Image (tube, rainbow, N blue to C red):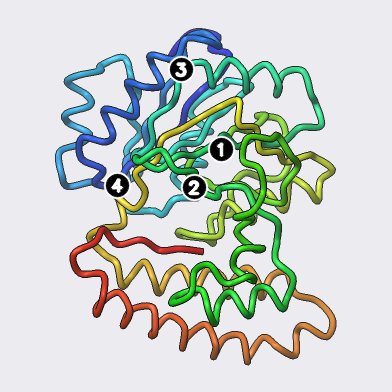
């Protein structure tokens, strides 16, 4: 542990291969907020990535989860292992741009009502991944679910994924991608951390919603930047991930919908099941040569 570290990076690893070491080194290289307390939580990887990391960077702490416990529980294990007041939760297939930690730690330290910050996330080709979004209205959510698989630029999906906003501008948002997400430690503790009922997917939407419900702001700030490969840890189980994604969407809806919307829950369950089957078929027919990607 870095003594009295101002910030910590919690990285959850599951068979990320060489990406894990690249991610950790990008964090160690960013000294703009001082040295990071780096905690890697391993969900029982079998690819040797943790052994490689331990040999190459012995100063990094490794927490063994004791199995594949899911993303949320692993994040909570990592957060519990550090005392830093600013915590970055990073996917192992991300690389941090130097200077990001300094900008984000300064904002979180100076703005007590700011619960979470998300950086500009870029794909390996330099294009922007739409990582900061609004919660969709019912019509947008339904149309996105229906059309998004084969018409990704439809107006409903564009509105939900915020494809037409200026990604060079800072703004308040409803939720941020969990691939790279910074928190005030006290804000995260106040809402009870990440909800461990979500094994994977929707946990980032949920934690941002609970932060906003507690009176904290959630913001996107392109002054920080992260490169994200996307889907590395999910590549070996694409169909399981598709099913899990749709199950998590159902869990979120079941926990959040109130009033008249409750009547629609059985219909939503059927629609999500059908969509999951269609998504698996689309992947099988057209995605065999591509890296599996589960898109929300």
Q: Which residue is mark 4?
A: 14
Q: Position of residue 28 (x, y in %)?
A: 38, 16
| Residues at circles 1 and 3 in contact by the CB criterion of under 8 Å | no
The tag earlier along the polypeptide, 1 or 3, is 3
The tag earlier along the polypeptide, 3 or 4, is 4
Q: CA distance from mark 2 to mark 3?
A: 19 Å
Query: Which quadrant is the N terminus positioned in?
Result: top left
Q: Position of residue 197 (x, y in %)?
A: 54, 61
Q: Position of residue 120 (x, y in %)?
A: 55, 36
Q: In front: mark 4 or mark 1?
A: 1
Q: In front: mark 2 or mark 4?
A: 2
Q: Which residue is mark 2?
A: 129
Q: Which residue is mark 3?
A: 98
| Residues at circles 2 and 1 in contact by the CB criterion of under 8 Å | no
The tag earlier along the polypeptide, 4 or 1, is 4
The tag earlier along the polypeptide, 2 or 3, is 3
Corner quadrant of residue 222: top right
Q: Which residue is mark 1?
A: 181
Q: CA distance from mark 2 to mark 4?
A: 22 Å
């Amino acid at each position: 542990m870095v003594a009295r570290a101002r910030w910590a990076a919690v990285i959850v690893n599951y068979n990320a291969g060489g990406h894990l070491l690249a991610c950790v080194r990008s964090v160690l290289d960013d000294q703009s907020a001082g040295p990071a307390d780096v905690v890697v939580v391993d969900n029982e990887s079998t690819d040797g990535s943790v052994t490689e990391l331990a040999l190459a960077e012995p100063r990094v702490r490794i927490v063994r989860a004791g199995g594949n416990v899911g993303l949320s529980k692993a994040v909570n294990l990592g957060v519990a292992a550090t005392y830093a007041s600013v915590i970055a939760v990073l996917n192992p297939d991300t690389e941090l741009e130097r200077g990001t930690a300094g900008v984000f730690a300064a904002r979180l330290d100076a703005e007590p009502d700011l619960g979470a910050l998300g950086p500009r996330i870029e794909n390996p080709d330099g294009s922007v991944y739409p990582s900061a979004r609004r919660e969709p209205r019912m019509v947008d959510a339904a149309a996105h679910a229906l059309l998004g698989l084969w018409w990704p630029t439809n107006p409903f999906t564009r509105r939900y994924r915020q494809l037409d906003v200026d990604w060079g501008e800072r703004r308040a948002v409803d939720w941020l991608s969990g691939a790279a997400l910074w928190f005030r430690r006290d804000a995260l503790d106040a809402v009870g951390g990440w909800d461990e009922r979500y094994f994977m997917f929707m946990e980032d939407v949920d934690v941002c919603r609970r932060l906003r419900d507690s009176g904290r702001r959630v913001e996107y700030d392109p002054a920080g930047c992260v490169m994200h490969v996307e889907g590395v840890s999910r590549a070996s189980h694409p169909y399981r991930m598709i099913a899990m994604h749709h199950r998590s969407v159902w869990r979120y809806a079941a926990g959040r919908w109130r009033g008249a919307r409750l009547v629609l829950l059985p219909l939503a369950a059927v629609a999500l099941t059908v969509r999951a089957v269609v998504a698996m078929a689309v992947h099988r027919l057209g995605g065999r040569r591509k890296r599996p990607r589960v898109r929300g």
